[in-house]
Every structure is written in C-alpha cells, then in structure tokens.
Amino acid sequence: MQAKLVWDGVLGFEATGGSGRSITTDAPVAAGGRSLGPTPMELVLFGLGGCMGIDIVQILQKSRVEITDFTMELEGERASEHPKGFTKIKIHLHLRGKGLGDVVIGRAINLSMEKYCSVRSSLKAEVVTEYSFENS
C-alpha cells in the first residue's frame, strides 16, 4: 500500500493513494491552514469508520441479514499533550434491516474490532515507523 503527499505551500497536502484516488487534507484556519479538507486526525476517524463499516456489512450479509440503512458516528477524545493522539474513540452505529438483532449486530461489531479491521488493529498496536529523507 502506498501514498504520496504533495504540499500546497501552506498547511495542506494533496494525498494520492496507490489506487490513484486523491484527497486534500488541511489544517483548520485557527491553526494556520485554510480548512480545504479534513484534518489528518479526522482522516483517522474516517479510516476506522470505513474499515469497520465494510467489515460489519460483509459479516451481516454473510449472516443473511438484509441491511436497509447504516450510519456511524465517531467521536475521538485526544490527549492534551503532544502528540495529542486519540485516548478514546466512541463509535455509535445506527442499523436498520430485516433479520437484525442485538446478538448478530454485537457479533459483527466484535469480529470487526477484534479480528478483521486493520485500522483498529493499527490504532492499538505499536507500529514500527521508519523514515528516510532527501535534502536537495
């Protein structure tokens, strides 16, 4: 998996993934950015919600549940000191469909969080991060 980010000259970046799709990420105006896109920490929440959502839909479909509506709300609490990472993330799911029950929904959520969601796994793991740079 790859990504390339190109600086916009202020505090934003045009980020392009290996898929060829791109998104602009930026800092809020209050921090010196232009608010032209989601902040990097919002992207973390988007990634977690998207990853879990895909897992949950697939698990429920395999359980022969017909989903008619599905939304999630995520709220991240951050540390007050740098690097100000997330200390807690609350996820609230709204599901509608035929064949839904507390047991099947709970099972799908737990399987996503504990087994399948790579974003969730990355958040709870100590990820080895290496870097290199050029100064030209």
Image: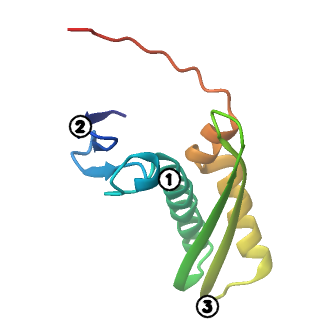
- Asked which secondary structure carries label 1, the reply is helix
Say which amino acid is labelled 2: Gly
Q: Residue at x 70, y 36 (%)?
A: 81
Say which amino acid is labelled 3: Lys
Q: Classify mark 2: residues with Cα within 10 Å, few (<14), some (14-19) or many (20+).
A: few
- Quarter of the image with the C terminus is top left
Question: Measured from the top left, where is residue 130 in percent x and y?
Answer: 49, 15
Question: Measured from the top left, where is residue 7 in percent x and y?
Answer: 26, 36
Question: Measured from the top left, where is residue 88 in percent x and y?
Answer: 74, 52
Q: Classify mark 1: residues with Cα within 10 Å, few (<14), some (14-19) or many (20+).
A: some
The outermost residue toward the right is: 103
Q: Are marks 1 and 2 in contact (CB under 8 Å)?
A: no
Residue linked to disc 2: 9
Residue linked to disc 1: 47
In the image, 94: left or right of 104? left
- Asked which secondary structure carries label 2, the reply is loop
Residue linked to disc 3: 98
Closer to the N terminus: mark 1 or mark 2? 2
Say which amino acid is labelled 1: Gly
